[in-house]
Amino acid sequence: MTRLPDFDEVIDRIGTHSVKWDCMESLYGVSPQEGIAMWVADMDFRPPQAVQDALTTLMRQGVYGYWGDERAYTAAIQWWMANRHGWTIAPEWIFTTHGLVNGTSLCLQAFTQPGDGVVLMTPVYHAFARVIRASGRKVVECALKTVEGRYEMDFDAWDAQMDGTAKMLILCSPHNPGGRVWTAAELKATAEFAQRHNLILVSDEIHHDLVMPGHTHIPMAVAAPDQPVVMMTATTKTFNIAGAHSGNVIIADPALRARFGATMAAMGISPNSFGIAMATAAYSPEGAAWVDALNTYLDGNRQAFDAIVNTIPGVKSMPLEATYLAWVDFSGTGMAAPEFIARVEKTAKIAANHGATFGLGGDGCLRFNLATPRARVVDAANRLKAAFADLQ
Ligand SMILES: Cc1ncc(COP(=O)(O)O)c(C=O)c1O
């Protein structure tokens, strides 16, 4: 039975301990009652019914002991990666972490030493830099270049930047916040860059299922099959179950796997039963149909948002190839960040992520989360248009 969702349903999340809605006032000064939460990357949608059913089954039985017997879980992951991503994996390659920020942090512990450099292609997901610095490692910012309105890699410039102190590269694929789906050639070139500079290659592919029509995500392990790579995937972004804090680090290479396994053991990490139950139910034919419907809906949101926002003189929303995170460049307005941010927060009453937090190249932009009912996306875009009405 296919049970497809109504993504237009407005679900009130205020007062539910949602970081997105219940912390927007303290973080952005925007009240949730009159404002719109468009910052942190979770969606205002319920997950597939199969996920709800899995939790209901757990609750009906009502005993919440330690989880064990991973066969159904690893089989579901294998099925999903083979069917949705053309990637064949073995169960013993899979480690389950408490999310992928945790996975990133474990990679830093396993593969680098304090003081080592870690390369990021900026602007990029802000938590990478946060955990690198908190772990006593150094962020090496390699700036993406903008070519015809979208981000491209710049290996000539980055080769010149490498001085031997960097030991790891964290790729974000698809890219948050630029929404790029990297091509096979770009992925291969990234693997070669990592090899040239002896960088452990970590590929965070948490957004791999959220791909717009006309684009195809290629896992790094498929694009560069001969290169050791640490792959990071999760059900949490795809199915909006981030509160489960569950993710998978998947490593085919035996030497890297042994090092990562030793760090997992040292940290005493094992999965929680709620994350496993939800992930196993999500990686299913019903979950696949739900994601297909979601991507069609998100593509409609993206088009509705861009159609309005791109009419504001000096404002440009990067065309999204993947993710539901619109990256909007305000630099063409001639305004400094405090001014356009004030207009977005105080006049439009929208909480959006500040571009500077994504690193080098981000300060002229804001990131808007479009995974909310269409009517709210259109309302937000019209509020932005009104907040910059004097430019029109
Ligand atoms: C690239 C990327 N990695 C990781 C995460 C968060 O992962 P988790 O919630 O599993 O820690 C996000 C969240 O937006 C993300 O965009």
Image: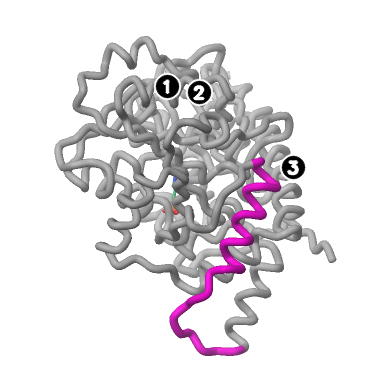
Which numbered disc, 3 or 1, marks the residue closer to the eye? 1
Q: Which is more toward the observer, 362 or 155?
A: 155
Mark 3 neighbour density, 10 Å: few (under 14) some (14–19) many (20 or more)? some
SS at circle 3 = helix
Residue range corresponding to the magenta coloring: 61-86
Q: Is residue 78 above or below residue 275?
A: above
Left or right of residue 280, residue 108 in this image: left
Q: CA distance from mark 3 to mark 1?
A: 34 Å
Identify the amino acid type marked 3. Thr
**What label sits on residue 188 in the rendered view?**
2
- Quarter-wise, where is residue 389 in the image? top right
SS at circle 1 = helix
The residue depicted at 56 percent of the width and 56 percent of the height is: 235
Residue closest to the far front: 254
Identify the amino acid type marked 1. Glu
Q: Which residue is mark 1?
A: 192
Whether ligand 1 has any atom under 8 Å from the Cβ at mark 1 is answered as: no
Q: How is the rendered protein coloured?
A: one colour
Q: Which residue is mark 3?
A: 296
Q: CA distance from mark 2 to mark 1?
A: 6 Å
